[in-house]
Amino acid sequence: MSTILPAGYTDALHPITNDDHGGYASIASGCGLVFVLMFATIRLWNCGRIGYFVDDSALFAGTIFHVSQSVLVLIAVDYGFGKSKLLLDDKTISRNAKLIYASDILYVVALFMSKISIMCLEMRLSVERTHLRLAKASLLFTCIALLAGVLMVAFGCQIKRPWAQIENECAGLYTRWVAIESLGALAEIFSFLLILRIYISLQIYWKAKIRGLSVFGLRLVVVIFAVYRIRSLRSFSISSNPSLDRIQVVTWTQIELAYSLVTATIPCLMALMGKLNTGWGTLTPQTVIAQSQLDSQKVTAGTYELQSFKRGDKARSQNNTLASGPSHKWTIGAPQADGRSIASDDSTGRIIKRTVEIEITTERGDTLH
């Protein structure tokens, strides 16, 4: 019995029925494209131009591969991918197998490019020697995993017909994908441990640490999606109707890939980057001045030594005085070098120098230097 739709409504492009599950892949691919392109646009606006940092370039490359992969999936669904094998002929099944085979290769590339982007970002967070060595080791491991994953998918079950995974039994398909997803999970875990190592040593409030770790920890959900994808692959490998059941694998593929690319951008959109300015290394080397000994500083004429800002009644009374009094512009400059640093003789540690300028203005245009 057909359903009568209200005026102004049309049938779904890919309706979901007992014999057609292609709509699941269409929804996952469409929603994934929207979120990935939206976050890629925000990141492009944030960084200014492509190629400014390696992590930005890696993410944009992964986005391009994701778009291409999603287009192939949508084309396959239009050709009948996701329908029962009783509704498809051999030619259509073979054509869809080729499209999904190509999309699997693009999926591996895009997935590991998102991981490379995160690792390149973490490499810029510190110039500490140990951190750089660990970051480079994780980056090398991810690049090797990317190459291995592409080769495992590209070889397929048959050398002459590597895309033939439905028509013929492919015993090694499940094992290869388990290896690929396991390598990706190891890369994610090592990446999180690397950022955890940075945050543990930071002298900031524990709430700020939790907030920063939670942003990077969002990527660990990718491991959960990978587990669900492996489970669906297991069902597909023993299915009596693989043309219909394979849609579950593709759906989890789209979800995992889109989430991985989106969460690779989230850390760049948060204010936590300022929390990572430990003085031992930040996003730009120009902000760090490291040497074994620095001359001490003294107050010059016309400047005032910076004191701690305290909260309470005293601070509120000072604010009221400033609000009711004449308006002035105050400049608090860092003192110039003269003499020796306190307790820095024979020191081999790094000393950080930072200049802070504070201006206070009110409605009156008077200024005082």
Image (cartoon, rainbow, N blue to C red):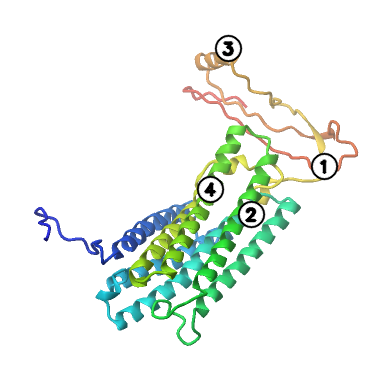
Disc with the residue nearer the chain's start (1 vs 3): 3
| Kind of residue at disc 4 | Pro
Nearest to the eye among marks 4 and 3: give it: 4
Q: With respect to residue 50, does 267 lie above or below?
A: above
User: Residue 56, position in %: x, y?
Assistant: 53, 58
Marks 1 and 3: CB-CB under 8 Å?
Answer: no
User: Residue 279, position in %: x, y?
Assistant: 70, 42
Marks 4 and 2: CB-CB under 8 Å?
Answer: no
Left/right placement of residue 58 relative to residue 200 reads left
Q: Which residue shows up at 43% across the image and 62% down it?
A: 232
Q: Which residue shows up at 54% across the image and 71% down it?
A: 176
Mark 3 lies on residue:
313
User: Residue 197, position in %: x, y?
Assistant: 68, 46
**Which secondary structure lies at badge 2?**
helix
Q: Quadrant of residue 338?
A: top right
Quadrant for the N terminus in the image: bottom left
The CA span between labels 1 and 4 is 30 Å
- Classify mark 2: residues with Cα within 10 Å, few (<14), some (14-19) or many (20+): some
Mark 1 lies on residue:
349
| Kind of residue at disc 1 | Gly
Q: Which mark is residue 267?
A: 4
Whether residue 10 is visible, yes or no, is yes
Nearest to the eye among marks 3 and 2: give it: 2
**Which secondary structure lies at badge 1?**
loop
Mark 2 lies on residue:
190
Quadrant for the C terminus in the image: top right
Disc with the residue nearer the chain's start (4 vs 3): 4
Disc with the residue nearer the chain's start (1 vs 4): 4
